[in-house]
Image: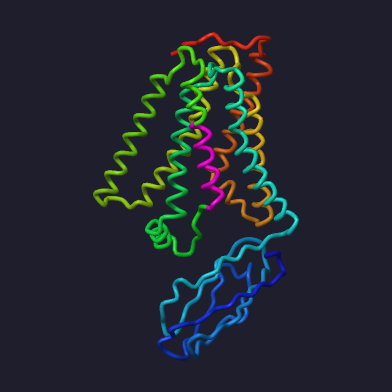
């Protein structure tokens, strides 16, 4: 809600075992939200109460409830988010959809480049393999968090006053990305690839990740960890791969002294998506006075920044260091 605005919600009481139960509402930050009424008395079953929350300060605040005598109302809570400007909030939503669309489209320039050249020479196989594992890992995480009841219940047990950190958009984006990478891998089998293959270093990294996955599944099987812990492990693999995946492609460009075969269109779309993502984070942090989301969570912001740095490096390689030749280089290159 916007600052100085109010919103109401209905609290419905069912199966009340005893009358005259007093319920008091406690804002996490009293300088951000005001609640009216601050207390209610439950007197009968199936009774509805209107509660009004007013935003008096910018930021987020949890609203919880406590009862006298004590009854089980742990599930009664509300998270209020108060923003400065409705216009900034709308702009943030638009930018969010923009980077979702840009990142979704960013797979296609490389697929088209491969199709046009009938060759994948210049596309690093380590990058492709790591990207495949990364998207598969995060697809497992998002589907598990969103669809599997046992995992959702475990998450709510651990974080009873938090929302599931996955939306349907996350699932759709990752499934789409996985399919696009599979198409690109298929192109590697049917088009000219020269002597290119996964490097020894890349193979070692992939095998290590496979062993780590197998170990974590064994831990789940023997009840040492829960399935939700396995999903978090999948998300950590995705973060690690985001840090590593561009390095092989940048190195291949350096060894070949050429970016032929590596789509600059995909680079620009990746760059634009990353800039939109970081811009949305900054706008939201300003609008909700929540700079902890940026500087208190360096992994999300740092990974976005790291990705953008690599896109600028690819642009420099393409337009400055290794300017495109008149005729595309289809000469097989073995740099392993």
> Residue 23: where, in percent of width, then height?
50, 82
Check the picture and name the quadrant holding the C terminus: top left
Give 11 or 101, whichever is nearer the viewer. Answer: 101
Give 307 or 217, whichever is nearer the viewer. Answer: 217
Residue projecting furthest to the right: 87
Residue beneath the point at 43% across and 38% down: 237
Q: Which portion, as a residue range, is magenta?
A: 167-182
Magenta: main secondary structure: helix
Q: Give the quarter of the image for residue 276.
A: top right
Q: Decide: is 289 above or below 302.
A: below
Residue beneath the point at 61% across and 26% down: 112
- Does the stretch in magenta take in 170? yes
Residue projecting furthest to the front: 190
Q: Decide: is 117 above or below 303.
A: above
Check the picture and name the quadrant holding the N terminus: bottom right
Report the side of 127 relative to 315 (left or right).
left
Report the side of 281 relative to 130 (left or right).
right
> Residue 160: where, in percent of width, then height?
44, 64
Give 31 or 167, whichever is nearer the viewer. Answer: 167
> Residue 180: where, in percent of width, then height?
53, 34
Q: How many numbered badges does the structure rendering display?
A: 0
> Residue 238: where, in percent of width, then height?
46, 39
Q: Decide: is 6 above or below 208.
A: below
- Does the stretch in magenta take in 6? no
Residue beneath the point at 73% across and 54% down: 88
């Amino acid at each position: 809600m916007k600052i100085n605005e109010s919103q109401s919600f209905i609290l419905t009481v069912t199966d009340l075992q005893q009358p005259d139960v007093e319920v008091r509402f406690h804002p996490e930050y009293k300088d951000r939200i005001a609640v009216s009424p601050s207390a209610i008395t439950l007197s009968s079953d199936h009774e509805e109460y209107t509660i009004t929350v007013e935003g008096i300060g910018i930021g987020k605040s949890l609203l919880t409830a406590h009862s006298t005598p004590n009854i089980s109302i742990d599930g009664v809570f509300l998270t209020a988010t108060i923003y400065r400007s409705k216009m900034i909030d709308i702009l943030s939503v638009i930018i969010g959809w923009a980077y979702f669309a840009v990142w979704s489209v960013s797979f296609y320039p490389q697929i088209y480049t491969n199709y046009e050249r009938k060759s994948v020479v210049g596309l690093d196989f380590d990058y492709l393999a790591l990207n495949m594992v990364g998207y598969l890992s995060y697809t497992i995480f998002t589907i598990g968090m969103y669809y599997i009841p046992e995992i959702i219940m475990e998450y709510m047990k651990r974080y009873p006053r938090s929302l599931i950190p996955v939306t349907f958009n996350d699932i759709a984006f990752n499934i789409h990305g996985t399919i696009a990478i599979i198409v690109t891998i298929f192109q590697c089998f049917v088009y000219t690839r020269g002597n290119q293959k996964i490097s020894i270093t890349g193979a070692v990294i992939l095998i290590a990740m496979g062993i780590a996955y197998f170990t974590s599944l064994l831990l789940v099987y023997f009840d040492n960890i829960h399935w939700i812990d396995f999903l978090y492990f999948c998300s950590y693999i995705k973060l690690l791969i985001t840090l590593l995946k561009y390095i092989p492609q940048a190195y291949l460009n350096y060894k070949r002294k050429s970016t032929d075969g590596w789509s600059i269109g995909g680079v620009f779309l990746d760059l634009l998506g990353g800039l939109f993502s970081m811009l949305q984070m900054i706008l939201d942090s300003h609008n909700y006075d929540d700079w902890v989301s940026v500087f208190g969570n360096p992994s999300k912001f740092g990974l976005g920044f790291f990705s953008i740095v690599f896109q600028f490096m690819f642009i420099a390689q393409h337009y400055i260091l290794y300017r495109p030749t008149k005729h595309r280089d289809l000469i097989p290159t073995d740099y392993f």
